Amino acid sequence: MDKHNLTVLTEFILIGITDRPELQAPLFGLFLIIYMISVVGNLGMIILTKIDSKLQTPMYFFLRHLAITDLGYSTTVGPKMLVNFVVHENAISYYFCAIQLAFFIMLITSELFILSAMSYDRYVAICNPLLYTVIMSQRVCWVLVAIPYLYSTFVSLLVTVKIFNLSFCGYNVISHFYCDIPPLFSLLCSNTHEIELIVLILAAFDLISSLLIVLVSYLFVFIAILRMNSAEGKHKAFSTCGSHLTVVVVFYGTLIFMYVQPKSSHSFDIDKIASIFYTMVIPMLNPLIYSLRNKDVKYALLKTWKKISNVFSKV
């Protein structure tokens, strides 16, 4: 496109999930409920795993950081998406769009490797139970979350700066409910070959490397479970693995479906549906899957609720 057709954009317009007026109110109510459940569930998990003395093991340390990333990227997207249901024209400033994209990439990438760290934690717990506390020391746990945070920040800044240093055309309508990479690519007038290649390589590396850690960890876990003599021990181990693997399959599946595919096969409507799953639904489900089925978390929640009730009853 010629340079005289380029323009300096100050804002973008987000299309949102749907443009059908009759669906705006029902979808607003539905996603508001989903988002509130996500906030309460993940915030509750963060607080519980921080204050309860019985929830100070490596497993709950990783669950706390999973909740932080879930809360982070659902909040990066959720409130702005909800606004789109109640305003006529949902504008987002040029710089806020860049900030939203940066935080989203950082938090999503972090979650990939935190899920991998959780898989490794389960591997050590089941395959090396006697050395668990030695191997999964506090220092090791912090390293396993610090590296993903630092790496994801680097990836986020690299991709965001690259995209927003390119020239946008005059058309500023984003066919999505948040600032994401594929719909932003469609608005660029500059040659996008380099940034598309960077995104493809990074996405493939992140997905394959983190998923490989998960698969290898669980391969050893399943071998160890099959060698167990106790039926109760097998059931408990399978139950723990089942919850984590359910989240892994849904989360990795939607990301692979969206980002590691040829450009020609991209459909923004299908991408929106997939995006809803990992930006809104998964952050809501994770606290339920990992927490409410756990006796220690249930006990900690009940104990905390009783303390709060006692405080208010004395007022």
Image: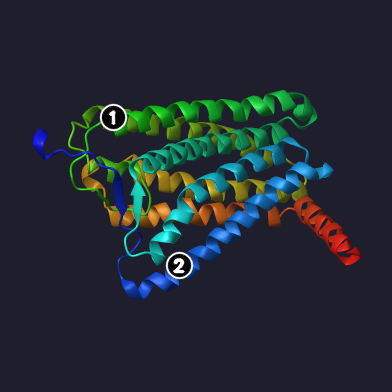
Compare residues 302 and 154 and report the one nearer the observer: 154
The amino acid type, in three-letter code, at marker 2 is: Phe
Q: Pointer 1: what residue?
A: 165
Labels 2 and 1: the sequence-earlier one: 2
Mark 1 Cα shell of 10 Å, populated few (<14), some (14-19), many (≥20): few
Compare residues 111 and 12 and report the one nearer the observer: 12
Horizontally, is 7 left or right of 299 in the view?
A: left
Q: Nearer the viewer, mark 2 or mark 1?
A: 1
- State the image coordinates of residue 39 (x, y, percent, origin top left): 60, 55
- State the image coordinates of residue 120 (x, y, percent, origin top left): 62, 32
Figure check: 235 above or below 229: below
Q: Distance from label 2 to label 1 (Cα)? A: 34 Å
Q: Pointer 2: what residue?
A: 28
Residue found at the far right of this picture = 314
Residue 203 is drawn in which quadrant?
top left
- State the image coordinates of residue 303 (x, y, percent, origin top left): 84, 56
Q: Secondary structure at mark 2?
A: helix
The amino acid type, in three-letter code, at marker 1 is: Asn
The residue located at (45%, 60%) in the rendering is 82
Q: Which mark is residue 143?
A: none
Residue 314 is drawn in which quadrant?
bottom right
Q: Which corner quadrant holds the C terminus?
A: bottom right
Q: Which corner quadrant holds the N terminus?
A: top left
- Circles 2 and 1, Cβ within 8 Å, touching? The answer is no
Q: Secondary structure at mark 1?
A: loop
The residue located at (55%, 36%) in the rendering is 214
Residue found at the far bottom of this picture = 22
The residue located at (27%, 33%) in the rendering is 196
